[in-house]
Amino acid sequence: MAAEALASKADKTLNAWVDAWNREDLDAMFALFMPDAHWVNIVGMHWQGRDAVEKAHRAYFEIMFRGVKQRLLATESLTPLPGGGAVVVTRLAVDAFRQPNGVIKPPSEDRLTLVMIPRGDDLAIIHGANVAIVPEAQQHDPVLKKP
């Protein structure tokens, strides 16, 4: 598959994810997933199977994500996989929200890695991992740090 076509399909899935999240349409959000999908959330919980991934997201939407918006900031990389899939790393802006412990988490940026595989004419999510971008730690990145 041509790089341009793969990027277009990946963008379509990413935009559908953010759109469904922002509309709080979890049915649409989880229609983007394969049945055997996995998800590692921002605090390291690992959910296996779309049903578990969906159950967890629905629970957290009730607890803390109602009204919390996401915005795609940039796709940082797209690595093609054999068979027409891709590993996509993107940056998201996330609104502030109240965590289950009552603490307000201020607006932040997350780095989302999605493994997408072909499903019909589109790409579906088979694995996702959401990682918080910790600003204080970024200054110590040995790859980006200037000598």
Image (spheres, rainbow, N blue to C red):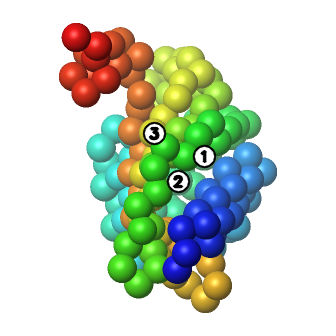
Residue shown at the point (57%, 55%) measured from the top left = 58
**105 displayed left or right of 18:** left
Give me the C-alpha separation between circle 2 and circle 1.
6 Å
Amino acid type at image mark 1: Phe
Q: Position of residue 136 (x, y in %)?
A: 35, 12
Say above or below: 146 vs 143. above
Residue shown at the point (60%, 32%) measured from the top left = 93
Say above or below: 20 vs 109. below
Q: Name the residue under label 3.
A: 111
Amino acid type at image mark 3: Arg
Q: Where is residue 100 in the image (x, y as percent from the top left)?
A: 47, 31
Residue shown at the point (52%, 80%) measured from the top left = 1
Dot 2: element: helix
In the image, 90 versus 33, the foreground residue is: 90
The disc label shown at residue 61, or none: 1
Residue furthest to the bottom in view is: 120
In the image, 139 versus 70, the foreground residue is: 139
